[in-house]
Amino acid sequence: MNAEVFYFTGTGNTLSVARDIAERIDGRLVPIVSVLGKEKVQTTSEIIGFVFPLYHFEAPEILEKALTKIENLENKYIFAVATYGLIPLDAIQKFKASVERNGGNLAAGFTVNMPHNGLGFKITFGVEREQLYRDWREKLPTIVNTIQKRKQGVYEKSNILKDFVFSGLMFRALPSLIRVLGVVAVGGWDSISFKAEDGCNGCGVCAQVCPVNNIILEEGKPVWLDHCTLCFACLQWCPKEAIQAGNLTTGKERYHHPSVTLQDILEQKKPDS
Ligand SMILES: Cc1cc2nc3c(=O)[nH]c(=O)nc-3n(C[C@H](O)[C@H](O)[C@H](O)COP(=O)(O)O)c2cc1C
Ligand code: SF4
Ligand code: SF4
């Protein structure tokens, strides 16, 4: 199949999903980060996929940047898959609008529930994590079939009452949500900014892994600049678990998808050939 699958990932959930799809449609994986530095990207594939995590119910900002660089979006079969940790809301509809702004037409869009890699949401950790991976394996054939048959107009959307309130998810997530909102209410979003603790050994993995080069090392310690895309890769991949987001992540288990390695994340930054 003549397909390219553009992906962005911080902690590997999205890469694992993108890989599974690319493998089955015989597509080529292209890291979105690798095209950001280019003036324009030419694609000759008939099928283009965008696979990304949700941040605050929408695609990361860099997806919009990437879309502006990809030429010839018109006349392509375009699909999107958004991984999410809690609830996606209307993220696919929002992404559909982004694709249209850039001259394309989103034919199909799916959401995939994965473990939450963000601020202390423990509810999808532990036993439930394995269930999420199993659910993905069950859902995969439907997505592949949609793409292979070039189906149009298939857009997944979540219902906040059905998926969040009545499923009981809201009540399980409430302690974490209250904690995050409480910290933000008292100290603003700046109070959850990243910092490295004493355990940091200056290895530089955080700077290497940052997809947007938002971290520099000064005197052997990381310093965060001002264009973070919130992927949480630095915090989750630090081998010493020395990075904290305010005081929200102290003592929390670190997470990355089990099938994805640090090397895979570093590959994301290699220039696309
Ligand atoms: C800053 C941030 C914001 C997030 N916002 C949402 C959100 O609005 N809704 C949601 O369901 N999950 C949200 N998540 C969870 C991620 O979308 C989810 O864990 C995703 O699978 C991570 O993908 P990755 O492992 O490829 O980086 C957020 C995660 C982060 C770090
Ligand atoms: S990855 Fe962790 S230990 Fe290494 S420099 Fe960054 S904060 Fe320090
Ligand atoms: S600073 Fe950390 S969270 Fe922000 S983009 Fe870089 S790796 Fe991701």
Image (spheres, rainbow, N blue to C red):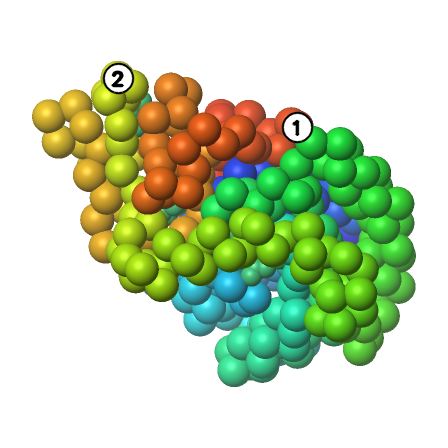
Q: Is residue 22 left or right of residue 131?
A: left
Q: Is residue 27 visible?
A: no
Query: How far is disc 2 from disc 1 in space, using C-alphas?
Result: 26 Å
Q: Amino acid at mark 1?
A: Ser
Name the disc covering residue 251, or none: none
- 38 w.r.t. 252: above or below: below
156 or 266, nearer to the observer: 156
Which residue position is annotated with label 1? 259
Q: Amino acid at mark 2?
A: Asn
40 or 245, nearer to the observer: 245
User: CB at mark 2 closer than 8 A to ligand 2?
Assistant: yes
Spot occupied by residue 204 in the image (x, y as percentages of width and height): 28, 25
Q: Give the residue drawn at x 33%, y 49%.
A: 192
Disc on the earlier residue, 2 or 1: 2
Looking at the rendered image, the disc whose residue lies closer to the viewer, 2 or 1, is 2
Q: Give the residue drawn at x 60%, y 55%.
A: 174
Circle 1 packing at 10 Å, graded few (<14), some (14-19), many (20+), is few
Give the residue furthest to the left: 219
Question: Does dot 1 land on a helix, a strand or a loop?
Answer: loop
Question: Does dot 2 land on a helix, a strand or a loop?
Answer: loop
User: CB at mark 1 closer than 8 A to ligand 1?
Assistant: no
- 131 w.r.t. 48: above or below: above
Specify the quarter for ligand 3.
Answer: top left
Q: Give the residue drawn at x 41%, y 42%.
A: 248
Which residue position is annotated with label 2? 201
Q: Is residue 138 visible?
A: yes
Indicate the quadrant where residue 206 lies: top left
Q: Is residue 106 left or right of residue 98?
A: right
Spot occupied by residue 28 in the image (x, y as percentages of width and height): 64, 45
